[in-house]
Amino acid sequence: MFQIVRKQVLSKGAIIRFDINAPRIAAKVKAGQFVIIRVNETGERIPLTVADKDAFSGTITIIFQVVGKTTALMRSLKEGDSLKDVVGPLGKPAEVENIGTVVMVGGGTGVAILHHVAKAFKEAGNFVIGIIGAKDKETMILDTEMSHICDELIITTDDGSYGERGFVTTPLQKYLDERYDVKLVYAIGPIIMMKNVCKLTKKYNVPTMVSLNPVMIDGTGMCGGCRVTVDNKTQFCCVDGPDFDGQLVDFDELEKRNNIYLKDEKDSLLNSIR
Ligand code: FAD
Ligand code: FES
Ligand code: MG
């Protein structure tokens, strides 16, 4: 059993942070890796990225958005409660090197995933520019933490209630126009955001990594559920990723595959609250 030692509501009850006692994972996990969680004996398995770790206290941090049955069940848990299984670290760590100037672009809950990667790039000695976006001020997460990590940080909201009004691609384009030293862009967030970032960076010929979120079941490369197409080749996101060269990803296929079970997921949530 894996005890929740701290619970924090980051946004209107819909984005939650857990610090979980998992010393063996905390000792090994690297930025970009994830865990697969099962809340209880009969629960489904869901992947969540390790947003941070504290090897000293033996805890890992996960930050999740409540979107359906399992995440709603997780929201109901309290400090001191436990999760049945936490398996990991899974997936390949982000490739982090000292390359100069990097731009970290995050959207929505994607900022939770980006945050760990941005920290690793900063610790490796890079000049880190952060651009993070959300729907509104209420749903913006980890802006304070990102401001401590990044050398420069731009905040955007769709409604202009915090930072610049609009999408993350506008300040990104400005940076790409004004600075010729951007060596890498990392983009993590909704599929449409990652797709548009990659479309833009392709024009400027700037390498761009993305973190993909297909439906996963076993997380070990056995079931094929998480297959994605990158450079016209099939890849299993759980073992070959989750990070890939975004300019080679078939985002339209990913979006279609992620929506396959929408009706079942909705029914399953409704049945659980009836
Ligand atoms: P459901 O109603 O069952 O599903 C809602 C949507 O979530 C689905 O339409 C589908 O797009 C997605 N989803 C459902 N089941 C799965 C599954 N087994 N695997 C992957 N996606 C699924 N979310 C976060 O909020 N924070 C994170 O740090 C985070 N990290 C992730 C890392 C990876 C590698 C992947 C693949 C996904 C990550 N996700 C993260 C997404 C998270 O797994 C889903 O939001 C979660 O499974 C939804 O479960 P649910 O039962 O509450 O919702
Ligand atoms: Fe089964 Fe990746 S989740 S192969
Ligand atoms: Mg589910």
Image: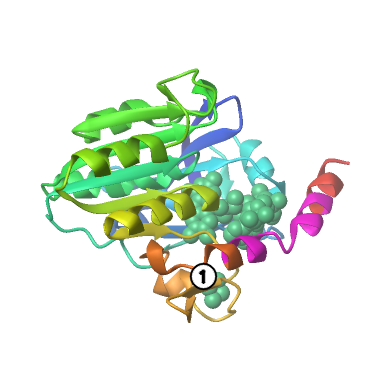
Task: Say which quadrant the C terminus sits in.
Answer: top right
Whether the residue under disc 1 has CB within 8 Å of ligand 2: yes
Magenta part of the chain: 254-267
Q: Nearer the viewer, residue 81 or 98?
A: 98
Tell me, what colour scheme is on the image? Answer: rainbow
Disc 1 designates what residue?
Answer: 219
Q: List the single residue furthest toward the top.
A: 161
- Where 143 falls versus 28 (above or below)? above
Residue at 25 percent across and 42 percent down: it is 177
The x, y position of residue 67, in whole percent, is 66, 43
Residue at 39 percent across and 57 percent down: it is 210
The x, y position of residue 199, in whole percent, is 42, 55
Q: Nearer the viewer, residue 24 or 172?
A: 172
**What amino acid is labelled 1 in the image?**
Gly
Q: How many marks?
A: 1
Q: Secondary structure at mark 1?
A: loop
